[in-house]
Image: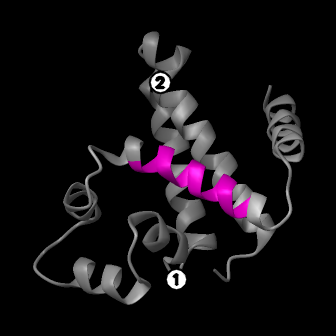
Amino acid sequence: MKIATKALATIMLTAMLALAASSGASAASGDSATSQRNDKKLSRSYRKHDRKMELRAATLGETVDELKTELRDSENNFARVLKKHGFKNEKAFNVAMVGKSKDELKRRGWSDEKIAELVEKRLQRLS
């Protein structure tokens, strides 16, 4: 995978924030605006850092060319492709993306402590 380590960490953090907003206290209080805002941030992060679809294709277990062909052929949108590969919805896919990102960071030499420290720093900055 050719995605830069810093970009991989950004994708992981953004996906974690989107998941927390959609399933956390904001979802319980009915604040869908925060959830939608974080989903938009996540899609922008995908467009910017994973523009060649390497991470998304690896998470789905196929090559980039296969994913592009699926998206191009027969009116498939990303939600249909996710369902075809066994994901219930985009939230389930984002959970898998967080896991894939963490695994890739660990493969590149990051420890669990370093990942937790990165997440903690980001959360402190946001609150």
Check the image and report above or below for 50 versus 89: below
Is 57 magenta? The answer is no
Relative placement, left or right, of 101 versus 62 is: right
Q: Quadrant of residue 74?
A: bottom left
Residue at 49% from the left image edge and 58% from the top image edge: 43
Q: Quadrant of the C terminus?
A: top right
Check the image and report above or below for 7 versus 20: below
Which residues, given as a range, are shown in magenta? 93-105
Query: Which numbered circle lies on residue 7?
Result: none
Mark 2 element type: helix
Q: Quadrant of the N terminus?
A: bottom right
Q: Position of residue 80 (x, y in %)?
A: 19, 60
Relative placement, left or right, of 29 versus 121 is: left
Check the image and report above or below for 28 versus 67: above
- The type of colouring in the image is one colour
Q: Residue furthest top?
A: 29
Is 100 magenta? The answer is yes
Q: Position of residue 30 (x, y in %)?
A: 41, 15
Q: Nearer the viewer, residue 89 or 125?
A: 89
Q: How many marks?
A: 2
In the picture of the structure, the residue carrying the numbered disc 1 is: 52
Residue at 45% from the left image edge and 19% from the top image edge: 27
Q: Quadrant of residue 6?
A: bottom right
Check the image and report above or below for 117 versus 25: below
Q: Amino acid at mark 2?
A: Ser
